[in-house]
Amino acid sequence: MCGAWRLHRYLARLWVSFTCAVYKFTCAGFYASYVGETVRHFSAFVKEHLASDKVSHIFQHLRNSESCRALCSADCFHVLYHASIDFQLKIKEVFHIQREQPPLNQQLHHGNLKLSL
């Protein structure tokens, strides 16, 4: 049973690494958070937000606060939800943003979703 549990944990980590996800960033130094979605490789996405994505609200927050920049790492990102299609991701992202109202979610433009049956 122990070996099966280890395999399950390993596969779960791969799932997080390669699938579409709604995520939450929680700043370690200040009461600030951000909810977003990505279809990209999660670990590469996190590294970009922390170091190089100049249009990211997370990057801008860290750039403006030296203490937050020193305290924040990849451990500040958590997957809230996985989905197999983009529409599910968008719905879950909106749900979590509305529920939590994270301070760093200051988007000026929102994508329009079309519902077709």
Image (tube, rainbow, N blue to C red):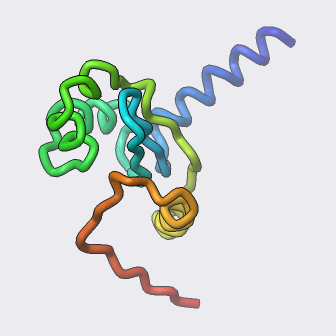
Image quadrant in which the N terminus is located: top right
Asked which quadrant contains residue 61, the reply is: top left
Q: Across the whole image, how many numbered discs are drawn on residues?
A: 0
Q: In this view, does 66 lie above or below 36?
A: above
Residue 64 percent location from the top left of the image: 16, 37
- The residue located at (77%, 17%) in the rendering is 5
- Camera-nearest residue between 99 and 31: 31
Identify the image quadrant of the C terminus. Answer: bottom right
The residue positioned farthest toward the bottom in the image shown: 117
Q: Which x, y percent locates residue 19?
A: 48, 44
Which of 65/81 is in front?
65
Q: In this view, does 57 lie to the left or right of 55?
A: right
Query: Residue at (44%, 24%) from the top-left corner?
Result: 75
59 is higher (above) or lower (below) than 96 = above
Point 56% across, 27% down: residue: 13
Q: Locate residue 53, reporting x and y percent.
A: 17, 42
Q: Where is residue 39 in the image (x, y as percent from the top left)?
A: 39, 51
Say if 67 sits above or below 37 in the image: above
Residue depicted at x 29% and y 62% = 106
98 on left or right of 58: right
Outermost residue on the top side: it is: 2
